[in-house]
Image (cartoon, grey):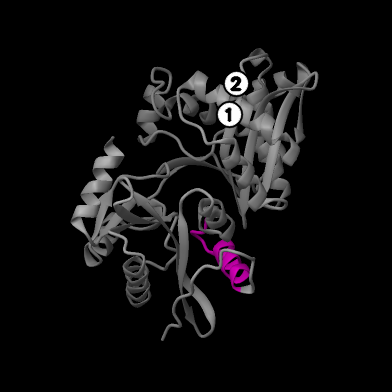
Amino acid sequence: MFDKWFELAEQSYSETDAEWDAFVASHPHGSLLQTTAWARLKNNFGWSSQRVWLRHEGKLVAGAQILFKSVAFGVARIGYIPHGPLATWQDEAQTAVLMNQIDLAAYERNAGFVKLEPLLWQDEIETAQWQAICQRYALQPADTIQPPRTAVLDLRPSLDDILASMKQKTRYNIRLAEKKDVTVRQGSMDDLPIFSQLMAVTGERDGFGVHTPQYYKRAYEVFAPEDVALLIAEYEKRPLSAVMAFKNGPRAAYLYGASGNDERNRMPNYAVQWAAVQWAKAQGCTTYDLWGIPDATPDELEAQFTERSDGLWGVYRFKRGFGGDIKRTVGAVDRIYNQLTYKLYQWRRNR
């Protein structure tokens, strides 16, 4: 019934890579985290990768790009499917064959478990149905790596209507940045040191970890030129704020943002984020994912956003102003093959 699996080519971009990326871009649950470019990025930073896929009548119908890594001082090996697998979960026959292929890939790579984190929204599947799927395939609810809850902007309306749908204060700050002579330009590879410097300042100021300059450079390289934009807000040619946004098919996402400590009263963060929204729409995208807000209900978000600053609460105050639909995925699940490996992973992650 199904033609089965294919191992990811890591050296050159092949016809099969192009076919896979087209499948990801067109899939309703597709994500840039399932693209060839994302695998190439992760292959440079301690991960290896493999794809499994299913064909029906010659056409790709389901698949997963799996990342593998050694953890806990190299004594345990894990698999991770970020924003995948890409499957029709309600199709039991398809899902069963795909899970078998994932099991086989994990066995060949000696992985103690595989974490699945599909980009499947809770409002797309009934809770009881998802629980039944998890029970059928021994998928254990688990900690997430990607933020499960986010805000997604609809880019189909006009720019004027998108702006009008934002909070009044955000619209004011976007216009204030323009009045205060903040300009935004699209950067290039030469501007990556600026971006990394701003990221370092942001991490130190806000108390969170950031990637190395090499990571941001490689992320830009593998997605350039069509699928990434580095946008830099400046005042008198001094960089104040920057965003790195990505697109995959009709979807765009804000993955990395940074800002300095100078001229913050000029609202450069608002200017650069608005520029990213405009870039995404110009690319033909229909959605813009703000990529991560606190995992709380809409009522809890509204009740607590002025008081809390831990975790993602600090950035939520900023993202909230841009509007969008609050959505949550079904979360992550683990398929466990070796309990000792799994316990080592949990111990290491907790540390």
Few, some or many residues within 10 Å of mark 2 (<14, 14–19, 20+):
few
x 42%, y 67%: residue: 87
- Label drawn at residue 261: none
Q: Position of residue 261 (x, y in %)?
A: 61, 16
Does residue 132 appear in this view? yes
| Magenta span | 16-31
Residue 199, numbered circle: 1
Magenta: predominant secondary structure element? Answer: helix
Residue 337: quarter of image: bottom left
Name the residue located 63 percent from the left edge and 68 percent from the top edge. Answer: 18
Residue at horizontal 65 percent and vertical 49 percent from the top: 156
Q: Give the x, y percent position of residue 332.
A: 34, 51
Mark 1, secondary structure of its residue = helix
- Label of residue 169 in the image: 2
Question: Is 27 in the magenta?
Answer: yes
- Quarter of the image with the C terminus is top left
Vertical placement of 105 versus 207: above or below?
below
Decide which of 102, 160 is in the foreground and name it: 102
What amino acid is at disc 2?
A: Lys
- Looking at the image, the residue that sits furthest to the left is 339
Q: Is tag 2's residue or tag 1's residue first in the polypeptide sequence?
A: 2
Q: Nearer the viewer, mark 2 or mark 1?
A: 1
